[in-house]
Amino acid sequence: MQRQGREATFRQRLMDDQKAQIRSFSAFVAHELLNPLARMGRSAEMVLREAKLPPKTLRRITDIRASAFESGKLVEVFLNNAALQSGQAQVRPVSMDVSAWMAQVQTEFTLNYPQAVLQICWPEDAPPVVLDPLLAKLSLENILINALKYAGPQCPIHIQVVVQPASVLFRVEDEGPGLKPEQYLLLGQSALLRHPTQDQPGFGLGLSLVATIAQAHGGSLQAQPRQPQGVCWLLELGQARSTTTQRVDGI
């Protein structure tokens, strides 16, 4: 009996070591991908600016630039998710001005996603909130990417910020096809979120990161059907209780 117990412990330790090695290798590969993807995107951008191209070539270079940008974002999602779940990355809340922060978030979104039609509403006179500004922005960005992917750039995306006594609620609504009832149960998991026969299959990695960030803030990520169509995403980030000396007015 003792021998079986030792063997079981050894096998479990071996499996844990192998999983750790796989995670470490995956993170290394993902990190190494960032530089070539960034170079590919910059090169495509330079070609578009410097060369006068025929329409067909222009479309292809534009697609290369967009694919490099999207792939880079996917790698960043993987790295951030792995770092948060492993404890290597921590939430760093600071006191920040919601109005100034949201204005800068909107500017960055508009620059990175010029095709998006954004309708953002936030309280101009809200009191300071205590959040991690970078992780909060990353959460909103991944919800936005998901909405753009499935709803399309022609559909407006509505973002409303509600400051509550102990948390900040981000309400994001898209006008896409919505989710199937069973797909709401997979929200935030590293599992297939959309059916593979749909035009835009995905594995929910971005939303998994949003859920991880929400949990790290003591909050949650939820979704509900939007009428007449679309999804209403509810991201709640709990404000840190500890007193912080640092303060930021933007990102």
Image (cartoon, rainbow, N blue to C red):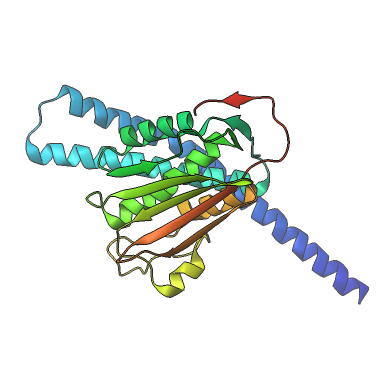
Q: Residue at x 64, y 48 (%)?
A: 216
Residue 159 as seen in the image, left or right of residue 24: left
Figure quadrant of residue 225 = bottom left
Residue found farthest to the front: 125
Q: Is residue 209 above or below residue 181?
A: above
Percent coordinates x, y for residue 63 in the rendering: 23, 42
Q: Is residue 48 above or below residue 192?
A: above
Location of residue 183 with respect to 128 vertically, above or below: below
Give the residue displayed 51% in from the left and 38% down from the top: 31
- Count of marks overlaid on the render: 0
Q: Residue at x 25, y 49 (%)?
A: 153
Which of these two is toward me, 177 or 36?
177
- In the image, 38 versus 174, the foreground residue is 174
Q: Is residue 9 above or below residue 25?
A: below
Q: Nearer the viewer, residue 14 or 159?
A: 159
> Does the rendering let one see residue 24?
no
Specify whether residue 78 is in view. Answer: yes
Residue that sits furthest to the left in the current view: 54
Give the image location of residue 199, x and y in percent.
27, 63
Viewer-nearest residue: 149 or 133:
133
Residue in the image at 42% along x and 43% along y: 141
Q: Position of residue 95 (x, y in %)?
A: 61, 31
- Horizontal and vertical percent for residue 28? 55, 41
